[in-house]
Image (cartoon, rainbow, N blue to C red):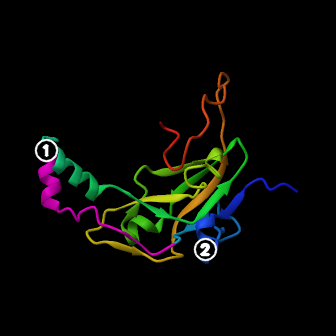
């Protein structure tokens, strides 16, 4: 029997004791996705509240070096999961935040959700390893422990328009590559 959808461990983490995602209860929609390693999500305020306020009030009129420093210090991080997901061509894996993340940990997925397309699996860029994009809005760094649940993955079917021709290109890489 051919498998339709599921998770696998990427080769980089084959012997690292990674857990495949599981649903915690019978009626849970999401599969809990864990961190593949200890990881620090820096506070977005580490750059300094006053520096952020200065940046906002300068309306972007800062020199290139200062802008790069701001971007470096308040951007999201990609937390490795050590897993990849396979699914049917008309399916997508939605990565959603765990409900406790913002309240208890100060962590949020900055774009609301993550989208893992079927053609991300085994791509040339990173073997299809999934990462959870997080931003920490608490005033202190958050230390994620290996095996800590970061997000939940929900497999879904999707619809296309009547005129859809299925895309014009093949995926050419890993995380964030389909937007090129």
Name the residue at 25% across, 69% down.
139
- Quarter occupied by residue 128: bottom right
Q: Which residues are magenta?
A: 37-57
- Quarter occupied by residue 33: bottom right
Residue 57, given in percent of the width and then of the height, sits at 12, 46
**Disc 1 packing (10 Å; few <14; some 14–19; many ≥20):** few
> Could you say whether the residue bearing mark 1 is in a helix, strand or loop?
loop
- Find the residue positioned furthest to the top: 163
Q: Residue 138 versus residue 70: which sits nearer the camera? A: 70
Q: Residue 25 versus residue 108: which sits nearer the camera? A: 108
**Disc 2 packing (10 Å; few <14; some 14–19; many ≥20):** many
Q: Which residue is mark 2?
A: 18
Q: How far apart in space, not on screen, are marks 2 and 1 (Cα)?
A: 44 Å
Q: Is residue 124 magenta?
A: no
Residue 123, given in percent of the width and then of the height, sits at 61, 49
Q: Which residue is mark 1?
A: 63
């Amino acid at each position: 029997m051919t498998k339709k959808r599921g998770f696998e461990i990427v080769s980089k983490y084959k012997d690292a004791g990674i857990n495949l995602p599981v649903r915690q209860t019978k009626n849970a929609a999401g599969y809990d996705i864990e961190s593949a390693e200890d990881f620090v999500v820096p506070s977005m305020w580490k750059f300094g509240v006053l520096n952020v306020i200065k940046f906002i009030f300068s309306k972007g009129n800062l020199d290139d070096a200062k802008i790069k420093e701001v971007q470096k210090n308040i951007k999201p991080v990609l937390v490795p999961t050590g897993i990849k997901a396979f699914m049917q061509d008309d399916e997508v894996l939605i990565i959603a935040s765990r409900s406790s993340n913002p309240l208890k940990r100060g962590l949020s997925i900055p774009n609301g959700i993550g989208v893992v397309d079927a053609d991300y699996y085994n791509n040339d860029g990173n073997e299809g390893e999934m990462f959870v994009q997080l931003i920490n809005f608490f005033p202190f760094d958050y230390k994620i422990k290996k095996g800590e649940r970061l997000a939940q993955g929900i497999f879904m079917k999707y619809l296309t328009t009547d005129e859809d021709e299925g895309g014009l290109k093949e995926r050419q890489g890993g995380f964030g590559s389909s937007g090129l």
